Amino acid sequence: MGLRKMITKSTSIHRFVSATVIMLGFTLATASTALAQQAVMIEVETQDTHTPITNATVELQSPLLPRPVTRPVTAAGSQIFPQLSPGPYTITVTAPGYYPRRVTIRLKPRQAQRLIVELAPVEPLKAEITVRASSERLDETQVSSETTLDQHGLRALPMARRTHLPDVISALVPSAVMSHDNFVHLRGNELSLNTFINGVSFFDNPHQLFTPGMSPDVIQSVNVVTGGFPAEFGNRFGGILDIVTKSGFDLNNHGSVSLGAGTHLRHNASAEYGGTVGDFGYYLFASGFQSDRFLNPPEPNELHDQGKGLRSFVQLDYKPGERNAFHFLVMAGGTNFQIPDTLEQAERGRDFFQENRAQTGIFTWDHVVSANGLLRTSLYGRLAQAKLLPTTDPFSIQARSLRADITLGAKSDYTQSIGRRHLLKLGVDTTWLRLREDFLFDPRQHDIELPAFAFRGRNTGGQVSLYAQDQLRLFDHFTANVGLRYDQYSLVTSEAQLSPRLNLAYYIPRTASVIHFAYNRFFMPPPIENLLLSSLLGVDGRPVRPMRSHHFEVGLSQLLGHRLRVQINTYIRKDRDAFETTELADVRHFVPTNFARGKAYGAELSVELHEIERLGLSGYFNYSAARAFFFGPVSGGFSDEMLDVGQRVLPAFDQIHTGRAGITWRHRRSGLWTTWALEYGSGTPLEAQTDERVSSDASKQAGRSDGTHPLFERLPQHLIANIYVGIDLFRRERHRVSLQFSVENITNRVFAIAKESEFTPRQFSPPRFFSGSIKIHF
């Protein structure tokens, strides 16, 4: 392969700059008003004539509020409660001459929920007053497939397992598949876990091999969206993590200190404190962690696999009144870790080492325009760096790299309630990217096709996105979220797409059921990690291109009784220029690759049992059956294998059956609780075999060979059990204490979890972990 030293430049960068200037001007022109994180927009009207009631009073109650908030409606019969935290709320509406009405809702991250409350007039001969209430268990307007996690759900995991955000998702979200190098994949997507931090999205991969990541402990609530995406979401669709972080207004002059210890050096420490001073709020967080098993190793017993890291987080809030709020978030982190070795590599003395660093800043100005209009503007930036230090032994393949990515951007969106049926949202997001990649490679005496070379790449570009969506009630119990998104991308290549989004939900009151359907068009820019290097090494000189997809989904949400909720979703996605990451010669250096086509489909079942207070029992069951395929030829970027037109290959994360279940018992009087959890996987592909029969029983799961498509063996299936036990002491006092003890993988079954390709060794799952933690609240 002929290699050259070059500096990559987009030929159409001037188009991106021009569009950015126009969109940034629009953003700054509207920056005098901005949307609050969560809000409830209430309209009160008569039940029979649907005319506004102008003398009504609305009361908002929640455990998240220090006291109930009561406000009269405006002359138009409306009222808005902005600047709320995600979670449960009870709304009581009263008016002279009408029966009161009580509604219970649960606000999701960044949700502006519109409620039309209808009051019935008091009957003269009836002296009894009733209060009607609705349940929060089933959202009749939910058009997406989503899983909402709050602090209660996150704290149930061991402290060591909630160190990294991907580990939390793998434990709690249906369809999540663990793969090589601690990657987590949702619904057959290579690029999974797109983090929206307080409404701002970044291109960086959140997995710990690429960035220091974000601590789950700073999350107030996260909504994981896997299907039925509104137009405001873009770039990555393998699980949108819509995150709202903690603030001083949430902690209300409280804090905590946590210490955790475990086998395999899985030690953790963290501290947080948040409070208010008048109209100012502040939240501070810092944590440190280490592990003897930082990445999935290529041996059952890890060798050269230590890692440690530090993270810090600061959020400052200023709320001069009910109509305005200012937020400033700063987040920094760093990890240092060894690259795991095989036994042979360890005997040679291979000692690759990597350092990751990242700093993030987000400034947001929120303002309420009116009782029906909200607007939010954010300015954001990130500097991410990864440095691979070379091995000191003279025999191993040698590599050294430095990757530094700068992200700057501005985002603004406006939400307007129009009449009884429309909730309109318009937005613009501009992102500027500067990539730097330095890479040195030497195969030494190893017989591989890739010769020695040195590369130094620089590129500047970005993306401009416009979106419009409307959540409308066409008629009673029928909700449609209809949207359109336009993306103009310029980095290495320059491409654009207009993406329609259609998400429908129909609520059946008699059976307490919600049926939803979605068609989404996706435009996904390539990953920025090692993008320039992969484009340099591209097959036939072809660079990595954006991926385009058609996504269809049908689902059912069913409420059984008051506590049991069942969700069933089926989906299919067809891709063009589908993404995969390819490792360069077993040095844990991954570059993006395009395949001509891709396909993923599956079905998911989720059962959730809300707590039975009398017994203290709650539980969950998740199961997914899924398939994912790539089809040749390679259409862009570097690849270590050539495929013919139409030739099929399975990605390393194609696990057919995935299941999780858990049951929790809680004794409220003593504060004692315990959780038993099971995790099952049917096994990921071992490697492809083309045009030949494979006789093993495991290979029969993949179907029969037809002489055209390859047949795949699979790694063995696995079932592991975990137990978590904890107790909350002194719960009625300010200085509370929480203790937790956990055993993960009780039977100590270590299994092969993934094999990325025939050129890389297998990687193995974690062994049995013991861990304990103490958390002191003050």
Image (cartoon, rainbow, N blue to C red):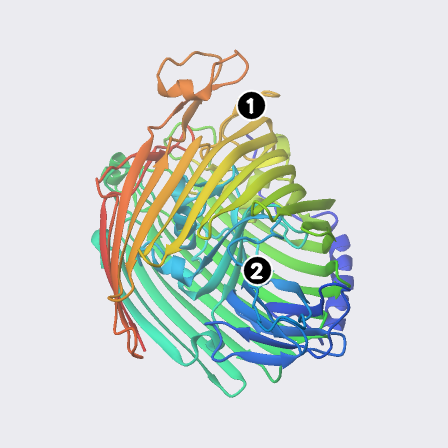
Q: Nearer the viewer, residue 760 or 212?
A: 212
The amino acid marked with disc number 2 is Ile
Q: Which numbered marker is on residue 643?
A: 1
State the residue lying farthest toward the bottom: 278
Measured from the top left, where is residue 463 in percent x and y?
Answer: 68, 54
Residue type (three-letter) at the residue carrying disc 1: Leu
Residue marked by disc 2: 406
Quadrant the N terminus occupies: top right
User: Between marks 1 and 2, how big is the CA–CA gap?
Assistant: 35 Å
Q: Nearer the viewer, residue 394 or 499?
A: 499
Which label belongs to residue 574? none
Q: Which residue lies furthest to the front in this view?
A: 125
The spot of residue 652 in percent (x, y) is: 45, 33
In this rendering, the answer to whether 99 lies above or below 345 is: below
Q: Is residue 241 left or right of residue 397?
A: right
Position of residue 607 measured from the top left corner of the image (x, y, whole percent): 44, 44
- Please state, as top left, top right, bottom left or bottom right, where the C terminus lies in the image: bottom left
User: Toward the viewer: 126 or 374?
Assistant: 126
Dots 1 and 2: beta carbons under 8 Å?
Answer: no
Q: Helix, strand or loop at disc 1?
A: loop
Residue 443 image offset from top left, x and y in percent: 41, 35
Residue at 38% x, 70% y: name it: 286
Nearer the observer, 496 or 683 = 683
Q: Is residue 446 left or right of residue 730?
A: right
Question: What is the secondary structure assignment of the residue under circle 2?
Answer: strand
Asked if one can make out residue 292 in the rendered structure from this viewpoint, the answer is: no
The answer to which image quadrant residue 111 occupies is bottom right
Work out whether residue 683 can be spotted: yes
Mark 2 Cα shell of 10 Å, populated few (<14), some (14-19), many (≥20): some
The first of marks 1 and 2 along the sequence is 2
Count of all numbered marks drawn on residues in the image: 2
In this rendering, the answer to whether 439 lies above or below 372 is: above
